[in-house]
Amino acid sequence: MEQYKTRPTKQFLRRNSAPSIDGIQGADAADFGVIPATSIMLSRSTVLDKAPSAAASSTPPVPTPSPSMQAARTHQHRLNAAQEQRTYQDSRQRLLGHIGTVMGICEDLKRERRFPVQYPKQPFSVLGLDMKMGHQAVNDIHKLESGTLSSLLLEDKLSHCLGHLDNLRGRVADTSSKVLVTGDLNSGKSTFVNALLKRELMPADQQPCTNMFCEVLDATLNDGVEEAHAIPDVTQYNRLDSSTFHVIEMRHLNKIIMDEQPSSRYQMLKVYTSDRRSTNESLLHNGVVDIALIDSPGLNTDSVKTTAIFARQEEIDVVVFVVSAENHFTLSGKEFLLNAANEKTHIFIVVNRFDSIRDKERCKRLVLEQIRQLSPATYADAEDLVHFVSAGSIDISEEGTTPKSVDAPEFARMEQRLRAFVLENRAKSKLQPAKHYMVNLLRDVSLLSESNRSNAAQASADAQRQLEMDQPAYEHLLQLRDRLLHRVEKMAGMATSQIQRQAAARLEAAVQAIGEHTIDQLEYPGILLIWQYAQDLADCMSQRLFKEVRQQENMTKRETAAALESIHTMAVEHLGDFPVRADVDSMKRNRHCVTIDVEATDFFDLDEKLSGCAISLGAALAVGSRMMGVKDVVSSLGGVNNIRRMVIPALGIASAGLILYVVSDMRSALERKLVRKFQAAARDSAHTEQQARRMARESRKVLRVEGWDIQARLQKAIETKESQRNEMTEVVHTSQESIEYFTALLEKSDQLLDKVASIQTDSTTRLYN
């Protein structure tokens, strides 16, 4: 048969494959618990007792190496194994350190909330988000606005990464390798485990008997004590905490394992046992590969999914699938292999009970064809991964003894290949997943850092360019504020000054001409009603001036409205259209009138009479001196007595004339007197000046409202512009900090990526010569 042909003595390990036993001789084989090939071939007939003597004689004898050659090969093997172990330990320690550093990067990135984070267009390997909107997935993650949403999503993803990294750290720190033994019902899994342990530990029967997962570990992990721990909750199990498990004596082990309802009490069973073979021959603890065997229940419709999920766990280094040579792969076995192949590309397959098959070549051909369809990668390395054995023919030692006969060569070869397969897969299953995950995670961090650094640089450049482009507009707005407000103030001042001058001039003119507009409007009722006439005249003058004030107020409104329109139009040209808030109708009107009281003296204009008399007296005195000669003449003619008789009538006539004159001139005197009195009252109260200032003040209030509105709009425009510029300045500042942060993060992740990528996780050491 092909797998028994002599192979070259020097061979490198292939991926997921093991070196052939034919290349191991003497002490080399003993180091891995394998008997030298020469002894195996010579004792084959005694072990199997079924092979014809012709077959034995047809097998070419293997030359026996010299003692010096055996010693050299043993020494080389030990050197290679030690080198492999040192390489693994070095890679393991470096990975543990790098995992802590990567977790620190993730923690720092998770806590960093100062800078907005945006997902890049390129897809992520680890940090990718699976977002759905309705029933459709959202693929354009990069279109999410950088802000709270994307930061929270990234924070949640980083939390998941931290948990996974912590699991990987525990996985890398674990020094043991776990081998899951599974297969169809009644395929001989427990028998196979007992054969590997060379001890009757697991219950074996013609009927299915293993009803729960049983993990077999070396007793040194339990302080050298042989016992079984029945675990109700695997996640809470702690060997040092007795409350998390129940101790089962070894003599009751079969009863617990064969319990038909174990899941109701226990999820798993951990069996700590001692391998009585030497360290080099031990499978559980041999100094190079420490193996924990997990015996699983047989596959059926109910357990196939559970076992497949168990096999996909990261803690499982190697899956050994035991198939019955009589039944080949059942539907349950095929389903398991298809599911497990998604996570474990190479499956170690043991075809048990092969000694009961008559046409062995046909059995091999059919089984290998099924493997080719179910696991092409396993089929490619079928020589190392597929073995046809009979576990039931292996000599099992009794309590406290060692096996008396050697194993069949097929089983010895299978065991040796399993050891080497586990040794190689130890780095592959423990270190390579951590390395692969960290490489992908660091690449994602680098991609995220590079993308966000580019985004920050672009945002900074855009903000700076926008600031430069906006600078002229900002300066123009500041200049416009000063210039426009100055022009508004100037126009308002000119308008109010003009209104005050016009009002003062008009009202002063009205006061001066108050008599002309009022006397003609009243009808004189006669001397008997002259008092009423005087009252009416006073009221008429007051109303006349009040009317003039109202007319001037209306004119002031019109002039204020015109000035307001001019100011508003000028502001609209620079600020755009906006409503006029000022209202000329809000200008207050005058409620004060100039009034005078009529007095008795107002009917007599004595001042005018006295002035006339004074003039007459002056004339008489001037002429008197010239009339002295006439006096002498009169005296000579009439005498003194005649003169005395003429004085009294003359005085009466003069008095009557005077009274008649005063009565006839009373209306004119009254009008003159009241007009002068009203003008004096208006002048004394500064009525015209007050009204002019009041109108100018009211006009100023209206125009000031418009000025304030313009100033407020200008200030708002400036504040808006300054706010925009402050935001852009803040963007520049934040972008610069973001650039520095993501640049440092990028450099750190790239350097760490190089270190992680340089870690050796594939076995390249030559184990056998």
Image (cartoon, rainbow, N blue to C red):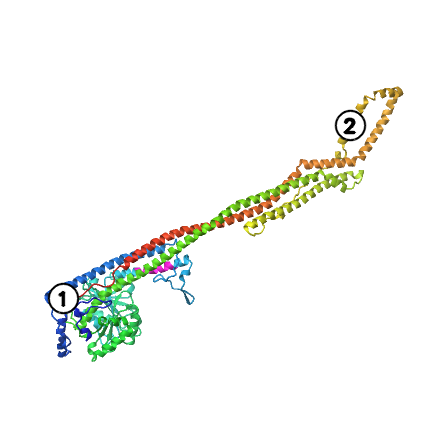
| Amino acid identity at mark 1 | Ala
Q: Position of residue 481 (x, y in %)?
A: 53, 46
Q: Position of residue 491 (x, y in %)?
A: 59, 44
Which residue corresponds to mark 1?
Answer: 27
Which residue is at the front of the view, 346 or 198?
346
The region drawn magenta spans: 153-165
Residue 360, quarter of the rendered image? bottom left
Name the quarter where the C terminus is drawn: bottom left
| Amino acid identity at mark 2 | Ile
Whether residue 245 sits left or right of residue 629 in the image: it is left
Secondary structure mostly taken by the magenta-highlighted segment of the chain: helix
Q: Eyeballing the image, is 74 above or below 660? A: below
SS assignment at label 2:
helix
- Of marks 1 and 2, which one's residue comes earlier in the chain? 1
Which residue is at the front of the view, 570 or 376?
570
Whether residue 361 sits left or right of residue 669 in the image: it is left
Residue 465: say if magenta: no
Q: Mark 1: few, some, or many residues within 10 Å (few <14, many ≥20)?
A: many
Q: Residue drawn at (69%, 43%), measured in percent from left and top?
A: 548
SS assignment at label 1:
helix
- Farthest right residue? 637
Which residue corresponds to mark 2?
Answer: 615
Q: Eyeballing the image, is 752 above or below 29? A: above
Q: Eyeballing the image, is 265 above or below 49? A: above
Whether residue 564 sits left or right of residue 81 in the image: it is right
Which residue is at the front of the view, 248 or 257?
257
